[in-house]
Image (spheres, rainbow, N blue to C red):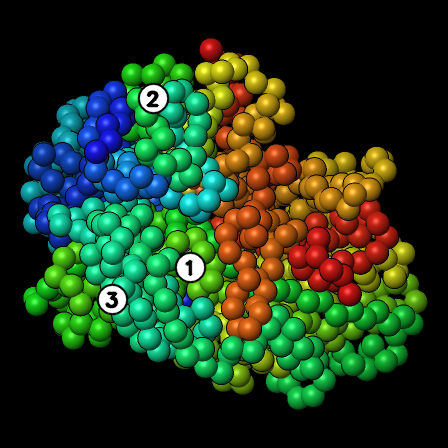
Amino acid sequence: MLTLQVNGAAHQVDVPDDMPLLWVLRDVLGLPGTKFGCGIGECGACTVHVDGKAVRACSLPASLVGDRPVTTIEGLAEDEVATEVTKAWLDIDVVQCGYCQPGQIMAAIALLKSNLHPSDDEIDQAMSGNICRCGTYRRIRAAIRNVAGAV
Amino acid sequence: MPVGTIAISRRRALLGAGGLLMAAMVPQGSLRATTRIVEDQTGPFAPNAFVRIAPDGSITLILPNVEMGQGIYTGEAMLIAEELDVGLDQIQIEAAPPDDAYITKALGTEATGGSTSTIATWTSLREAGAVARTLLVRAAANRWMVDPASCQTEAGMVRHGPTGRTLTYGELAVEAAALPVPTSPVALRDPSTFRLIGHAQHRLDGPAKVAGTATFGIDIRQPDMKFGTVAACPVMGGVLLHVDDSAARKIPGVREVLTIGNAVCVVGDHFWAARKGLEALEITWDEGVNSTVSTETVYRGLHEALQGPAIVAHTKGDAKGAIAGAATRVEAVYQQPLLAHAPMEPINCTVHVTAERCDIWVGTQVPMRARDAAAEVTGLPKDKVFLHNQYIGGGFGRRLEHEYVTQAVQFARQVAYPLKIVWSREEDLALDRYRPAYVDHLVGGLDAHGKLVGLSHRIVGPAVVARWAPEALLPNGVDDDLLAATVETPYAIPAMFLDYARREAPGVVTAWWRGVGGTRGVFVIESFIDELAASAKVDPVEFRRRMTGDHPRARAVLDLAAEKAEWGSKLPEGVGRGVALQYVFGSYLATVMEVELSQMGTVRVRRAVVAVDCGRVVNPDQVVSQIEGGLIFGLSAALFNEVTLEKGRVQEKNFNTYRVLRMNESPAIEVHLIDSTEDPGGIGETGTAAAAAAAANAMAAATGRRYRRLPLTGVQA
Ligand code: FES
Ligand code: FES
């Protein structure tokens, strides 16, 4: 039995030791906002925050999370930076199919929390682990810049 | 060439005349973020299949096409709302249930694909809105006993001009429903008075998608549902001989191991158990006849067909004679690889089969086909199969196929509980249905002034349409998708000869892929036009401009792109600038791209400038968005992608070996729209069609050598 702190609540789960956090979130806790894209840490669709840092949930066994707080796209309601980020996303209509966007948004929030005024290079560095097959990169970058400008 | 002749026939071919029909969708994330099932809702005022107004004032628009990122929910809602005279903040959107009413005449089908949606619904959805508004006005005029001509509408209400009295649409719903629907056409708004169309509107699906609450097929959860993942024979046509599942069944959380003729499914309490179980299986396949197919087999077959018989697909004048008499002869062979779709949302399908009914939750571009397949597998009548279509996490043509639905139903009918099957990314790449490989041979003749006098062209490759919609194969055996961008060009070409040698790809199933014939054809034609320009020693933009003859819209986009991209200005060492001009999907595009090649051989696209004339624009910013995304999608393929085969097995496994353009590799993209009053053209695939040619031409400009094989970073002949 594992205890996970997810979006501010403690959850007891009975799962195999090697089971990635992604599948615990999606299939056990019923939090489908975090997406599966590749399963090998290549696409970023599964990005969540563990202790405030962007982490690939598909590649992190849930048993290694310990008592560090996990935040998913479903757990952002109260977060100020997150509010600004989603607003910036909507302002310039970033999304297309939207499937990669929870991961993109989680990665962007983690970036902005550690660096409120990232340079273009820093944005690229933080975000280039997140694939968007619909090609929304230009708008993602612009939205992040807009948040930096607004705050 | 007007949209309408060849363009329409191509779309018909692409989508087939098979009378596809869209089945019920569970729509998600409307403005009010409601989720409703269409069948449960009946409003008293529903004058047609697209508008429903309830006495409580709720206004629901029913949209005939599926949303997979292209913004069509928003665009189609705008068309109806414009004429109905409601704001986008006053409506809810729903996707169409299965009904003949949603077959679009111009297509003969209800699939979503081929950049056809806006073209097909431009008039019909506006008419639907106008009819509803006309009836609401009549209902109000009856109540007030005034002349309908003295009433106006605004934002969901009718106003009597002289007295200022108002009634909301909801208040009029019951009376409007009692009125006869007009049989003669109602007047549509003058475009100069459009409030919505042509003015950027935010996407209706945006809020749910940024909140992570939009439900994709893969997110479906049903009571007592279990999770499956599958391995199908990695060699096409192979079958399952034996599976040893003793180790798999010992894995915690594994519940069941199911088999069908060519695949195994492990079912577990969650995807992870299923996945671990699958890895623990010992499977023996009979790989069948394709077990020796390699990439070389595929290309060899195509190149061999450059000689020998072919079907004449198009002739104009005496191209061969013109070439024989030309001052200069230019010749080139182009090769394009098999490509995977790799949408971000891996293939998945949730199915619950009981004795009475079959429910399917899936994201599909062809719900009717999927539904019919399920009926066949289960033996249930079609009206007992309920397909709940979901948001699609990337289609790109992959979800115009429904074999994964058939497979899921074959497994799910063996169990009593709802079964969600999710393919791994590895399975998605290994068992995709691929964009075909093609080889094209072109010969052009230039006169002494460097003017093209004749063009001879042979296309070798599969006819996707022959499998996908066989009735749409042209009587002479040509897949008319191949005529896109090759016959239908933005140029006045005095003499042309085009023939087609059909060669089906061994060892793979081929399918539609974003941009279809346009993506294929623009690369070939626009590369060759560049080669002709070089041979004629004329600047590539100037060479094209001279050829645009009776295509003023082509000339306009070309000039605009050249101007905005500062065509002709100096570039740093190692950077080349290339242009591509196209007329596909009824839209004109000119793309200027700058590509930088490093000493190390790495290639980076720095900048892309696109000028677009896609006729009247419904939602301008979404046009820009589609061009941006389409270009990126096309560039991933053009620069990096090739599906390779060895011993009949696809070698690309995941995004580490099937490389996708990332943010740090993406160019700056500028899109310039031409103000146009022509009927709308398609847009979702045009950017993809432009990518390879513009990049190849830019690389040629940078290095002085031609790039005739895709991917551009691969081995060149
Ligand atoms: S699913 Fe985790 S990085 Fe792709
Ligand atoms: S929006 Fe579709 S994958 Fe990013």
Tag 3 residue: B258
Dot 1: what SS?
helix
Residue at coordinates 59% horizontally, 65% vertically from top-left?
Answer: B644
Q: Position of residue B217 (x, y in %)?
A: 29, 50
Q: Amino acid at mark 3?
A: Leu
Q: Are marks 2 and 1 on the same chain?
A: no
Q: For residue B405, what is the image quadrant?
A: bottom left
Tag 1 residue: B427
Residue at coordinates 13% horizontally, 50% vertically from top-left?
Answer: B224
Dot 3: what SS?
strand
Q: Position of residue B278 (x, y in %)?
A: 34, 59
- Identify the chain of the residue marked 3, using the numbered disc in the image: B
Q: Are marks 3 and 1 on the same chain?
A: yes
Q: Amino acid at mark 2?
A: Arg
Residue at coordinates 39% horizontally, 73% vertically from top-left?
Answer: B284
- Residue B221 can be seen in this image: yes
Dot 2: what SS?
loop
Front position among marks 3 and 1 = 3
Q: For residue B520, what is the image quadrant?
A: bottom right
